[in-house]
Amino acid sequence: MTQPPICVVDDHEEIRNALVEMLELADYTVAAFSNAQAALLTLSEHWQGIVISDIRMPEMDGFELLAALQALDADLPVILITGHGDIQMALGAIRSGAYDFIEKPFRRDHLLEVVRRGLDKRQLILENRRLKHAIEAQGNDVIIGQSPAITALKEKIVRLAQADVNTLICGETGTGKELAARRLHEQSERREGPFVAINCAALPESMMEAELFGHEAGAFTDAKKARIGKFEYAHLGTIFLDEVESIPLSLAVKILRVLQERQVERLGSNQAIDIDIRVVAATKTDLKVLAEEGAFREDLYYRLNVVELHLPPLRQREQDIVLLFRYFVDQASNRFNIPAPDISLHVIDTLMQHKWPGNVRELINVAERFVLTDTLIDQHTLANWQSAPSLSSLPNRIEQYEKRLIEEALSQAQGSIKRTYEGLGIARKTLYDKLAKYGIDRHRFMDD
């Protein structure tokens, strides 16, 4: 796969050609110029690679070119070529913003090491910019992500929000079921009403009935005054029953009656109170299977599951992992008032290798610890933070990395096939074959 381009600027033809030959033999793509003015016509803030420039040149020297490039993009790595007598000047230029210098005559190993580090830095800068822009593009949307799975989820939430029917949200632990439920409420006509969340698994069975239905004074020991229940409190709004599979069978029939009649009776009272609510329930298990096994009331399952919303696990939305991590790192940095550590290419690669059994919740924890400890994330560290992940095989890791590079190239090319295969240095047919292999739809990278 073609490496990011390198711009070489030197007015001495022999030196320029020798430098170009060294770089091309190392499989780099090189654009060579005999003067700084010609190079500036090609370079922009979107330049994917780095710049190598001689210091002593007529008309515009290396320092002037450095200043012009810094005005164009302060983060563009510029490597200066120095003669022996120019080293002090080169060190001064580094203090002024140059990335590094290469002393004549060139030592191949040193040259390639400086170039590699410069290109790594450039790719990290561009990746962080892309993530920042992607986060900004999310606007006020609380569900962060651009993957096909999460885009489809957002669209479905918008449609279901207007339906005002009982909804069952299914998803693994940590996928954001309460967040989806809140989004359903906030985009519905009930948004001005209350959103009442109940974690059914966290309530002792002895307290659940009073918590949901409320009670009158004296209804039971310690009931010194009347108290409204969560169903009644959610009037004109939405009630969210998380981990609904934890509802005991003895209470299920009473909840079913509330859903059917839209009335509730407090404990110790015979008076029915009309309520106008939308019920959103969530489960990490298959309620239908539980109902068939007799562990959950089948009639309650069908009453709750008028429509169903499935939340994808993080492993099915790989494109969102780094975007979400950057978002949570920024949030943690602001909350703890600590500067966010740099997210290196090594960290990005490691994030992509992890299986994320705890989904988004686990990712939040990793991001917070990353900010608090500035810990270098590696597979061993992640294994200690959560259950140990099984590493992908080398072919799978290569495929994951290749897919991500293609998606980045499509994003930069705004979905253009020609610009993408040219940027990647592959044939058109090869690109089409890989799009089909990885199930990538180029249209989602096109501007509206």
Image (spheres, rainbow, N blue to C red):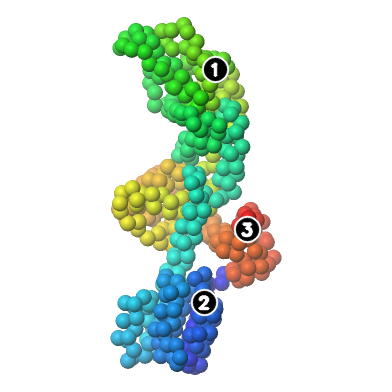
Residue identifier under label 3: 446
Rendered residue at 53%/30% (across/down): 190
Quadrant for residue 62, please give it. bottom left
Q: Give the distance between the C-alpha atoms of the residues marked 3 and 1, in whole angstroms.
A: 47 Å
Rendered residue at 48%/85% (across/down): 36
Left or right for 379, reference 3: left
Q: Secondary structure at mark 1?
A: loop
Rendered residue at 60%/23% (across/down): 302
Q: Does the rendering let one see residue 327?
A: yes
Q: Give the distance between the C-alpha atoms of the residues marked 2 and 3, in whole angstroms.
A: 24 Å
User: What crowding class fits label 2: few (fewer than 14 Cα within 10 Å), some (14-19), or many (20 or more)?
Assistant: some
First along the sequence among labels 2 and 3: 2
Query: Which of the pair 256/293 is nearer the observer?
Result: 256
Residue identifier under label 1: 262
User: What crowding class fits label 3: few (fewer than 14 Cα within 10 Å), some (14-19), or many (20 or more)?
Assistant: some
Q: Quadrant of the C terminus?
A: bottom right
For residue 67, the mark is none
Q: x, y (%) of residue 418?
A: 66, 68
Residue identifier under label 2: 43
Q: x, y (%) of residue 231?
A: 47, 20
Amino acid type at image mark 1: Arg
Amino acid type at image mark 2: Leu
